[in-house]
Image (cartoon, rainbow, N blue to C red):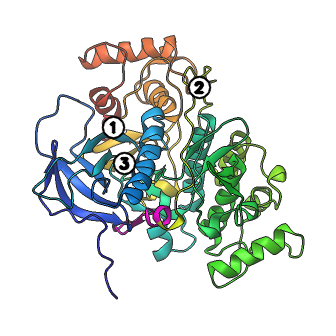
Amino acid sequence: MTRRPYAVPVPKGYRIGPWEVRAPVASGAFATVYEAVRRTASDDGELPHRVALKFLPTGTRTPRQLHHLRDLADREVQLLRRLRSPRLIRMYDTLTVDDPDHPELDGSTVLVLERAEGSLDAVLARTPAPGSGPALLAQICEGLHQLHHAGWVHGDLKPANVLLMADGSARLADFNMAAEMEGTHAYTPAFSTPDYTPPELLWPEVDERGTRIRPSADVWAFGVLAHVVLTGEFPLPGSTSEARSDAAMRYASGREELRLSPGLPDAWREILSDCLAPNHCDRAAGTAELLRRVEEAAGAARSARLPRLRPRRWRRPALVAALAAAVVGAAGLTYTAPWESDPAAAAPPTCEKPVVYEDASHRAGYMAGHSGTWDFTIKRGDGGSQVRELQCLLRHLHGIEEVGEVDGDFGPMTHGAVVIFQKRAGLDADGMVGPATWRALRKGEAA
């Protein structure tokens, strides 16, 4: 088997900013991701020791290619800068290579990303229908809800774009195709992964702004992904993507019925039928209700209610014109890092019963809901599953009843409880939960 050449070959030991490049972990034709370690002291206490560097060759292509690649990079950077949700892969920084001595790298855009241990795609390649599948689906659906709640569509949800962390939790990633909603639609490049594309977008109309896409496209993709995770099979017949796309078109026109796998658990059958409705109007109404149904089917703890968003104060910029399919398609990444799913993924902890897990950088510590990150800073006014885990640890691990209800909203009571804990732990009592506070929160006799 011939190894695919890396899109952006970066020598081991190459340094950019405080980072030193190590082994490659993922590659496509127009982007390569490398593991990197921090070699210099950081003024930012949030920066971890190990990250992933995504290199986009935005300085070494033809003018037309450069325009497309910069659009791809801008699309991902824009989303990751605006959204910091626990179920979305985190971006720490963006860098530009300034190195005339290496013309193949000079001008490249580099995204400094949270380091994953592998992808769902790699897990499914080794273990079809893994036992941890239902718990992972609940986390994937939570990430999709966080994305939609903030007004964005992913546009390319598939197993390769679901990354798995060291603690067994899932993150959505690769937002090259993501688009911000403008009313009922968003505009995304004229490209898609056929097996995860709803029938109405298999032959879409494309104008100067791209393809019009709705959140229901992500719901369809989730339905396909869930069927693959739970049964090891696609929900529509065919031995190739082309054959399955033809089956999807026949299904949408009423010439073929949806035949879900007999191996699909009963608890999931109605959920997936709703996700895979042939008409976008008939699909699951929204990811908030879908998430509750998925959590119930998975036997997972309910995630926190997301806070109501304040009206946006920025003007939504016009999204880029449709990108060439070859360029965008090649930007997809295939993760090849080895991964074995953590037992915690199959039996998630509860709020009332936090469990001990191992973190590669911080060793043992308690978790109470599969958030599990140690370096995600949250403060008063934030909301989501990371806040919920904070509240669980304060109340049920450290006995601080002043935190009030476990509702996922970082309000005055949660702020006060954090201050109480920080004073007990000998930390600066600023009410913000950063790496030092997370480390102290996660400690306990068993850890």
Q: Which residue is mark 1?
A: 374
Q: Which residue is mark 2?
A: 407
Residue 325 vs 145, above or below: the answer is: below
**Cβ atoms at labels 3 and 1 below 8 Å apart:** no
Q: Residues within 10 Å of mark 2 (few under 14, many from 20)?
A: many
Mark sitting on residue 357: 3
Residue closest to the far bottom: 1
Q: Which quarter of the image is occupied by the N terminus?
A: bottom left
SS at circle 3: strand
- Residue at x-position 36% and y-position 41%: 91
Residue 407 vs 105, above or below: the answer is: above
Q: CA distance from mark 3 to mark 1?
A: 12 Å
**Cβ atoms at labels 3 and 2 below 8 Å apart:** no
Q: Residues within 10 Å of mark 3 (few under 14, many from 20)?
A: many
Q: CA distance from mark 3 to mark 2?
A: 24 Å
Q: Which residues are magenta?
A: 327-340
- Residue at x-position 59% and y-position 34%: 150
Give coordinates of residue 72: x percent, y percent: 44, 51
Left or right? Give the position of 414 relative to 255. left
Compare marks 3 and 2 and give the one earlier in the sequence: 3
Give coordinates of residue 78: x percent, y percent: 45, 38
Whether residue 258 is visible to the viewer of this picture, yes or no, is no
Q: Amino acid at mark 1?
A: Trp
Give coordinates of residue 44: x percent, y percent: 22, 29
- Residue at x-position 29% and y-position 33%: 439
Q: Is 40 in front, or is 314?
A: 314
Q: Is 349 in front, or is 302?
A: 302
Q: Amino acid at mark 2?
A: Asp
